[in-house]
Image (cartoon, rainbow, N blue to C red):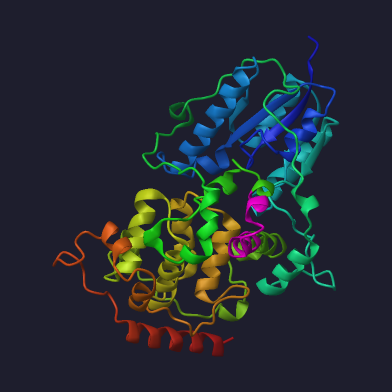
Amino acid sequence: MIKEKVTLFWFRRDLRFEDNHALWKAQQSEYPVLPVFIFDTNIIEELDEADSRVTFIHNLLTQLSNSLKSHSKSLYCKVEDPIKVWEEIVNTFDVQTVFANEDYEPYAITRDKNVKQLLAKHDVNFTLLKDQVIFEKNEVLKADNTPYTVYTPYKNKWLENFNTKHLNSYASNSETNFLDSDFKLPSLSELGFKRSSITVKDYDLESLEDYKKVRDFPALDQTSHLSPHLRFGTISIRKVIKKTLKHQAFLNELIWREFFMQILFHFPKVVDSNFKSKYDNIKWRNNTEEFEKWKKGQTGYPMVDAGMRELNATGYMHNRVRMIVAGFLCKHLLIDWKWGEAYFAEKLLDYELSSNNGNWQWAAGTGCDAAPYFRVFNPTTQIKKFDPKLTYINSWIPELNSLEYPTPMVEHKDARERAIETYKVGLNNT
C-alpha cells in the first residue's frame, strides 16, 4: 500500500491557528499538512483526574478540531509517550517534514532531542521554530556572550534589540493545505480525566489601559487574565506585545517572562536547586502541619489565607498576593521554596516552570536577582497598602471576624527575627 506524502505540524504550547510560526511554515509545503497533538503520558499520568488545565487543553483542542471538521479535515490526537506516537506516524504516513514551535523547558528539550533522533532514522527532518517569545535563549546576551542573570540590564538589552519587525505576524490559518482526514478526538474520560469545575477566563487586553494604576490591588480584579493563554498559546506573543508597547509596566512583566525562560535554559539546575548555591545550607524547618495550614488558607494571616483560598478554588492568584504568600511560606514558616513551588505547579492555571521557579526563588532569596534575605514582608502591613477596605479578603474569608477564624500561627516580629538569624547562620556555613 502506498503511503500518503504529508507534512506534519505538532501542536504543543501554541493551541491556535492564527499567527502560528511553525504552522505557517508547514502550510508552505507542497504536501498536505496533518496537524498532531499528543497527550504525553509521561506528564498527564502524574496529574489529578480533575486537573483544570487538562480540561482547558481539551476544550481548546475541541475548538481546533471543530474548525478543521468544517473543512473536512481533522486533528490527529494520541495519548501516549511521544516517541511511540512518532514511530506509529512514520509507519503510517510518508512523512516529509515535521514542524513544531520550540519549547525551552528541560523535559521538552530532551523529548525533542529524542524525537529528532527517531525521525532522522527515517530520513525525516524535524524543524523547530521560535514562536512563544520575542527573543529566545541566546538572542539577548552580555557583551561577552554569557547570559544575563540580573533583570534590569537584561531588560535594557531586550529593549535595545527590539524593533517592530519582531512583531510581524505569520499568515497561518485553519483552512490552507490541510490533509483531508477524519480522525476522532478522544473524550476527557477516554483520557482518564474528569471535567474540572474550574474554568479559564477569557483574556482582556483592554484592561492594560489601567494596569499600572491597579495592578497591586487584588480586590479590583482588573488584571488581563492573559497568563494561561500565553502558557498554552491561544494568543501569540507578537499580538500581545503589539498591544502592550504603550504600557511599559505590563511590557516589563512580559520581559520578566522571557528573562526567566532564558535563565531556565542556561541554568537548568534551578529546577531542583538554588540558583545561588550559597543558600544551600539554610536549615529549613519544613513543618508538614504548618505547610498544610498554609495550603488550606488557615494561617491566621488574612491576606495569605485569601490568596491560598483563591488559588484552591479558581486556579488563579493575583501577582501581588503570590509574592505575599510565597514570602510567608519561605520566611515566616521557613519552609523550603521547592514545597511551595510544587504546590503552585499543581494548582495554577498559568503554571509555567520558568516563571514559577524564578518567582519562588526570588521570594526565598535564593534566585538570580532575588529579594534580599532580610526583606520579610509584613502580611498585615500589606493589607493596609493593597486591600485597606478588606474587599478582597472578605470575598474569600467570610468568617474573618468570627471565632472560627484562626489566630496567627506565628507572630510576625518573632518570625522575621527567626528567618534572618536562620539565613545568617546558613550563609556563614558556606
Looking at the image, residue 229 sits to the left or right of residue 245; the answer is left
Q: Is residue 90 above or below residue 307?
A: above
- Quadrant of the image for the C terminus? bottom right
The quadrant of the rendering that contains the N terminus is top right
Taking depth in this image into account, of 44 and 50 the one nearest to the observer is 50
Q: What's the magenta region? A: 240-256
Q: Position of residue 409 (x, y in %)?
A: 27, 74
Residue 26 appears in which quarter of the rendering?
top right
> At x 62% / y 15%, what residue is drawn?
182
Residue ranking furthest to the top: 1
* x and y, in percent, of residue 25 in the image: 79, 34
Residue 251 colored magenta?
yes
What secondary structure is the magenta-colored segment mainly? helix
Q: Nearer the viewer, residue 188 or 139?
A: 139
User: Would residue 43 be found to the left or right of residue 172 on screen?
Assistant: left
Query: Image quadrant of residue 262?
Result: bottom right
Choose between 74 and 330: the one closer to the eye: 74
Residue 339 seen from this side? no
**In the picture shown, does residue 120 fall above or below 307?**
above
Magenta region includes residue 48: no
Return the x and y of residue 197 as percentages of the image width and height: 36, 39
Q: Residue at x 64, y 39 (%)?
A: 12
Front-most of residues 136 and 105: 136
Residue 249 image position (x, y, % from top left) = 59, 65
Q: Is residue 402 above or below residue 374?
A: above
Residue 411: tell me if it is visible: yes
Q: How many numbered discs sit on the rendered protein?
A: 0
